[in-house]
Image (spheres, rainbow, N blue to C red):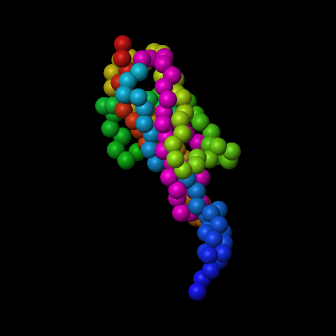
Amino acid sequence: MVSVKSLLATAFAALPLSSAYITNIATPASAKAGDTVPVTLTAAIYIQNWDDFGIVWGVKPDSWDCGRDVCVGRRISYTSLYPNNQPKPGQFTIDLTIPDDLQPGDYNIVAAIPYLVGASGLTQIQGHSANITIEA
């Protein structure tokens, strides 16, 4: 029979092998050019090591269809995550300033996140976006 102590030791030994990664972003439905808006990010546990290096923030017209590519449009900010600000599971908020010369219309706030996963050394970019209407 396996002891509780052995089970706990195994669970704690596995903790460094898992990490969190960003899975979603959300913004307010609308804002005005020049406003600072909170962007809520959600991070979930990943079973292996996962390092999100940072976030390239952009704003692009909602009409742009980039297919499977991650296109940020106009770059508006950068948030460094690695190594000191790695996300923890749950939600956190980053404030972004909407460019003050952005014309009214429907846009996407885009987060392009370069990351490294597993022992393979493979680096890729994941993208998340949220709709926002810029009002006059």
Q: Is residue 128 left or right of residue 49?
A: left
Report the residue at 41% width, 28% height from top: 28
Query: Magenta-highlighted stretch: main secondary structure?
Result: strand
Q: Residue at x 62, y 39 (%)?
A: 80
53 magenta-colored = yes
* In this view, 19 is above or below 114: below
- Give me the residue at 36% from left, 17% from top: 135
Instruction: Residue at the far bottom: name it.
Output: 1
Q: Quadrant of the C terminus?
A: top left
Q: Nearer the viewer, residue 30 or 81?
A: 30
| 104 is higher (above) or lower (below) than 6 | above
- Residue 76 in sight: no
Q: Nearer the viewer, residue 9 or 65?
A: 9
Q: Position of residue 134 (x, y in %)?
A: 38, 21
Which residues make up the magenta segment?
32-56
Does 23 sit left or right of 14 as displayed?
Answer: left
Q: Position of residue 117 (x, y in %)?
A: 56, 58
Taking the view exactly as shown, the residue that stands out farthest to the right is 84
**Res 16 → quadrant:** bottom right
Give coordinates of residue 68: x percent, y percent: 37, 47
